[in-house]
Image (cartoon, rainbow, N blue to C red):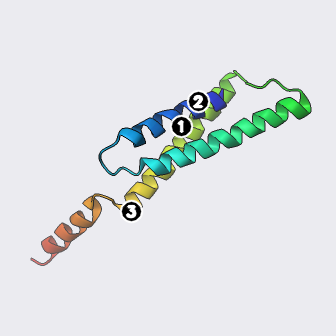
Amino acid sequence: MWLIILAIAAVISTAAWYFEEKDYELDFLSIILWGATIMVFIDHLMNYLVYGKPFLDTSLNAALLGITLVIIALVAWEAKLIWNDPKGKIAKNKIKDKSKMKI
């Protein structure tokens, strides 16, 4: 189930990146999600081929793991977005705060 959740999130983020007109650095989010999807796919494939386990796990724990991984990817993307400040919103607020301090 976590493979399906990650793959859906990767497809949505890639489509959003492709059609975006603003600089939200969605390419970074897409790369994180596609990397995780490929990693999970290989893990599932190896467990299926070597150990004979089912390819997809549809349990509640697997669904929660998929949701958790998407949340972690979003947090990493948000951290990078805040750090890079592509629109200059944080830097602009710092300048305003310094001008208020000169009273």
- Compared to 42, does 80 lie above or below? below
24 relative to 3 in the view: left or right = left
The furthest residue to the left: 103
Question: What residue type is disc 1 on?
Answer: Ala
Mark 2 sits on what residue? Answer: 5
Q: In the rendering, which numbered label is found on residue 84? A: 3
- Using the rendered view, name the quadrant where residue 57 is placed: top right
Quadrant containing the C terminus in the rendered view: bottom left
In front of the other: 97 or 25: 25
Question: What secondary structure is found at the residue carrying circle 2?
Answer: helix
Q: x and y percent of residue 45 in the render? A: 79, 33
15 relative to 88 in the view: left or right = right
Mark 1 against mark 2, which lies toward the viewer?
Answer: 1
Question: What residue type is disc 2 on?
Answer: Ile
Q: Residues within 10 Å of mark 3 (few under 14, many from 20)?
A: few
Q: In the rendering, which numbered label is found on residue 10? A: 1
Q: Does label 3 or label 1 sit earlier along the sequence?
A: 1
